[in-house]
Image (cartoon, rainbow, N blue to C red):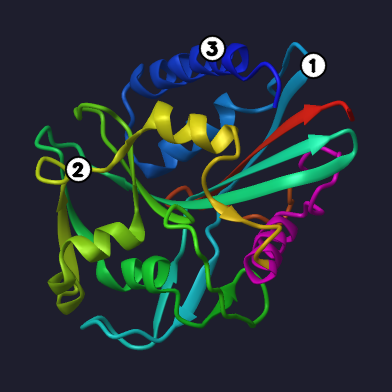
Amino acid sequence: MSGVPALKKQIKLILKHYEFNLNFPRLIDEVDFIKRTTGFFSKFSFSVGQTSLTTRTRFLHQSPKFNFNHSTPCKNPATREMADLMFITKFKKGKRIIRKRATIVQAKFTKTTDRKWKGIDTAQLYLISKWPAFTMVSPSPQRKYQLKPKSKAWGSYVFVGPNTLNNPVYYGAPRIGALDPNSFSQQTFTQDLNIVNGFDTSPSFLMRQILCYIGEDLMANPAVANFVDDLLRMINLEPDSPDEFIWDSKESAEESSGFGVVEFTLSTPEE
């Protein structure tokens, strides 16, 4: 991709404004974080040299829920939300999509200053780190999936809070599960970012996401690609459509949950 240094410089400025947007005023909960993220990245469009970056976003007051079996003390089978956000990046040459990656992110919020996130649900961690077979139970009809993702960033957590340093930070779910294998023997656990390394600050994570460096390679994994397409259809968006998102008049008015999608498209002309 030509002009990457100049493109990175422009993206850094955007992400700096995004960080400011998250901190002023202070975040109040996970839904606030999702709304601010989808709202900030809505309809970006700029070019650096021959490379352009455009975005489209969508927020729904409804989170998809999934049913699955697991090996934790939580009730079995479990029904859980999988993610609060989905990031997608497409890299196009002319009209051809030559690279496409996606990441799903579960947000966790704390009001404390000690960088400890308490009460994280173990069954949910099992779902987005072990990837057992699962069935979407809401809002779509029963549909079964068996994913075998290869990227450790495909299922990630983002830890946010109004009083925390490096807010927010991202951490791959498989790495969290590997930190303490005993966490799967409890119903909930605490994640202390003071004692772990390897987490991504928001600018680093999103820079690599926007440049299509991280996330599951959807062109190499049809099962995950089909699942991502189903999530897009769930919000009345045809995958890879040039149109903007269309609001779903049937969405729930519930404010305690939400699901957001942010899609980045990098485009360069055919050589």
Helix, strand or loop at disc 3?
A: helix
Q: Quadrant of residue 70?
A: bottom left
Amino acid at circle 2: Asn
The location of residue 244, given as percent across then percent down, is 80, 37
Q: How far apart are marks 2 and 3 (CA)?
A: 26 Å
Q: Nearer the viewer, residue 44 or 100?
A: 100
User: Most extreme residue toward the front, as rendered?
Assistant: 271
Evaluate whether residue 246 shows in this view.
Answer: no
Position of the N terminus, as image quadrant, is: top right
**Circle nearer the N terminus (1, 2):** 1
Q: Identify which amino acid the numbered label 1 is placed on.
A: Gln
Q: What stretch is highlighted in magenta?
A: 222-245
The x, y position of residue 47, in whole percent, is 74, 14
Q: Examine the structure image and report whether residue 233 is included in the region drawn in magenta.
A: yes
Dot label at residue 268: none
Position of residue 249 relative to residue 133, above or below, is above
Q: Residue at x 44, y 52 (%)?
A: 153
Most foreground residue, 7 or 191: 7
- Classify 10 Å Cα crowding around label 1: few (below 14), some (14-19), many (20 and above): few
Report whether 50 appears left or right of 221.
right
Per the image, label 2 sits on a secondary structure element best described as loop
Q: Distance between the residues labelled 1 and 2?
A: 37 Å
Q: Which mark is residue 50?
A: 1
**Which label sits on residue 197?**
2
Q: Name the residue under label 3.
A: 9
Residue 228 occupies quadrant: bottom right
Say whether residue 215 is visible: yes
**Relative to residue 255, is residue 225 drawn left or right?**
right
